[in-house]
Structure formats: C-alpha cells, structure tokens
Image: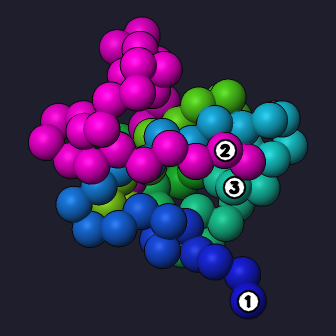
Amino acid sequence: MKQTISELVPAGSKAYVRFESEETCRAFLRQAEEEGFTFSDGTKPTRKHPSDLLAVHDDKTICYLGAVGRIAYASGAKTVGGKTLVRLKF
C-alpha cells in the first residue's frame, strides 16, 4: 500500500523533505496536489519549480526553504517554530 504524504506529516509537525533528483521532486509534487496540498500562496504544487529541499506542513501547505530553514535541516534541530521536525529523504 502506498503511503500518503499526509501520513508522513503527523499533526503538530512539519517535514523537511530532501529530494535526490528533480524527477523525484516532480513526482512528490504531483502526489501532493492529488492529496489537496498547496503552496502557502495557494498555488498548486505542479505549478511550482522543483527544489532539492521543501517544507511540508501539517495544514497541507508546502513551501521552499530559505537559508534559515536549510540551516535548521542540517543542524539536527528537533523542533522548528514549536513543531516537531521530521526529516525525510526521497
């Protein structure tokens, strides 16, 4: 059974997702759109450019990570903005 993106991001958490390739990110964005995720500005995921690192929130929004988010990802932080940080790699 295929796991949903929603199942990967439990309530009260956010996930930072690192992608091995642009195609893997595109597939992730397609699935996210099918599950009702949007970027924080309301844009559908497939309308955005793929990235090597994205944040996925438990409210079904996605965003790109800037410098601070990338530092948090690499630092081993356990929480970000009061939410549990889940690290995923595809």
Q: Is residue 77 magenta?
A: yes
Amino acid type, label 1: Met
User: Measuring 67% from the left and 66% from the top, which residue is drawn there?
Assistant: 31
Q: CA distance from mark 2 to mark 1?
A: 19 Å
Q: State which region is magenta.
A: 61-90
User: Measuring 25% from the left and 39% from the top, which residue is drawn there?
Assistant: 79
Q: CA distance from mark 3 to mark 2?
A: 11 Å
- Mark in the foreground, 1 or 3: 1
Query: Which residue is the extreme one toward the top?
Result: 67
Identify the element where label 2 is drawn: strand
Amino acid type, label 2: Lys
**Residue on which disc 3 sits:** 28
Which of these two is toward me, 68 or 49? 68
The spot of residue 20 in percent (x, y) is 80, 35
Identify the element where label 1 is drawn: loop
**Residue on which disc 1 sits:** 1
Q: Is residue 53 magenta?
A: no
User: Measuring 83% from the left and 35% from the top, which residue is drawn there?
Assistant: 21
Amino acid type, label 3: Phe
| Quarter of the view holding residue 13 | bottom left
If you read the primary sequence from the N terminus, does the residue marked by circle 1 or circle 3 appear first? 1
Identify the element where label 3 is drawn: helix
| Quarter of the view holding residue 71 | top left
The spot of residue 59 in percent (x, y) is 29, 62
Left or right side of 31 for 74? left
Which disc, if any, is residue 89? 2
Query: Which residue is the extreme one toward the bottom?
Result: 1
